[in-house]
Image (spheres, rainbow, N blue to C red):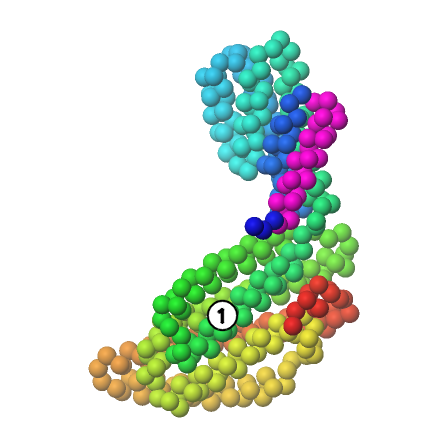
Amino acid sequence: MQVGARVLKTGVAIVIALFLAEFFKLPSPVFAGIAAIFAIQPSIYRSYLSIVEQIQGNFIGATIAVIFGLSFGHHIVAIGIAAIIVIALMRKFNLDNSMSLALVTLVAIMVYEGNDFLEFGTIRFVTVMVGVFAAFIVNLVFIPPKYEIKLFKMIDSLQDDIIRWTRLAARQASEHTSTKVALSKFDSRLTDVRNMYDFYKEERHYTKKKRYAQARKLVIYRQMITTTKKSLELLHRLHKHENEISNLPPQFKTMVQERLDFLLTFHEQLLLKFTGKLKPEHSKWVVEEDNKHAEVMDQLIHQIAYEQDREGEEEFSSYHLFYIFSRLLDYEENLEHLDTLIVSYRSYHGNEKNSDLEEGYY
């Protein structure tokens, strides 16, 4: 059983909400605890957006509850009609995230049948908002998330697995079904990486220097994700056309494997460079290896011309080579762009240390 930071924050928010409700002697403090559960968010910025939406949503719910309670009484049919109106208004104003809590506020107010209905509705609204503010306070001060560390860890882990499977696929050493399952998992993990990037993007800094550094990092992480996506697309192509690759001439197949090994190793070293483990300049061996790029393209053109001259179904393998090398070149261009961004960042922000990132890897 794993207990993450959000689970702990939810528990703490419930405790604080109940304590505040009892401290101010609010009736039915349980509604403050329920509100805290709905209002807890994974990031400070989303918590801020949530509290704004919750205020608006609960105001709508409480207002409709009071109007219907004073006009039609507390009949269960009136509560149902009021709930429909609240849902329609929440969708009209794009407040879907706070709809559940607004309905809780509505029902909690309308079930009361006392003479001081208006006063009770106000108190119940305040009780719910105590829970919302308790969740916001917990998000603000309790276990601040380090989304950059999580984001880089997810990218590094995913890319490491993609590189491993790509090396196997290039040598036709991987089992077809196992590779297919792995590709499906990689697609899902890439979606998780994008979601984590959104969390990191929402982090707010209060000094101009940190905001500037984060803006540059966001560009790098976005390119990291794009490059990882390109490497995954290349692996998909290698998997799809594994039979065509296995039928290539040994010399040409060896050349493809060497080029892939070079790019994959380059990718690994770029991640090392970003964490400060390599020198922050363009690698000389990369420049030297790029001289072989023209040779690779010449071999490709020669092989495609050869495949087109062959008879039978094998002539379609020339198009497969185009597909594979288009992914290969796209991957290479994105690696070069990522290298440029990292070199630029390390040149301007090389003195800024992120010990959790630079000392926690490799």
The picture quadrant where one finds residue 296 is: bottom left
> Is 17 part of what is drawn in magenta?
yes
Q: Is residue 24 left or right of residue 334?
A: right
Of the pair 29 and 259, the residue shown nearer to us: 29
Looking at the rendered structure, the kind of residue marked 1 is: Ile
Vertical placement of 326 versus 247: above or below?
above
Q: Secondary structure at mark 1?
A: helix
Residue 338 lies, in percent from the top left, at 59, 71
Q: Position of residue 351 (x, y in %)?
A: 78, 69
In front of the other: 141 or 216: 141
Q: Residues within 10 Å of mark 1 (few under 14, many from 20)?
A: many
Give above or below for 225 relative to 25. Answer: below
Please say whether residue 227 is visible from this viewpoint.
Answer: no
Q: Residue 112 vs residue 300: left or right?
A: right
x and y, in percent, of residue 198 in the image? 59, 54
Q: Is residue 1 above or below residue 53?
A: below
Q: Residue at 42%, 79% (x, y): give it.
A: 170
Residue 19 falls in image quadrant: top right
Image x and y of residue 126, in percent:
67, 25
Instruction: Examine the structure image and report whether residue 161 is included in the region drawn in magenta.
Output: no
Circle 1 residue? 162
Magenta-highlighted stretch: main secondary structure? Answer: helix
The structure residue drawn at horizontal position 73% and vertical position 45%, both measured from the top left corner, is 141
Marker count (numbered): 1
Name the residue: 27% across, 87% down: 309
Question: From the viewer's perspective, is residue 90 above or below residue 151?
Answer: above
Q: Quadrant of residue 317?
A: bottom left
Highlighted range, magenta: 4-26
The residue at 55%/17% (across/down) is 111
* Quarter placement of the C terminus: bottom right
**276 relative position to 77: left or right:** right
Q: Is residue 140 left or right of residue 54?
A: right
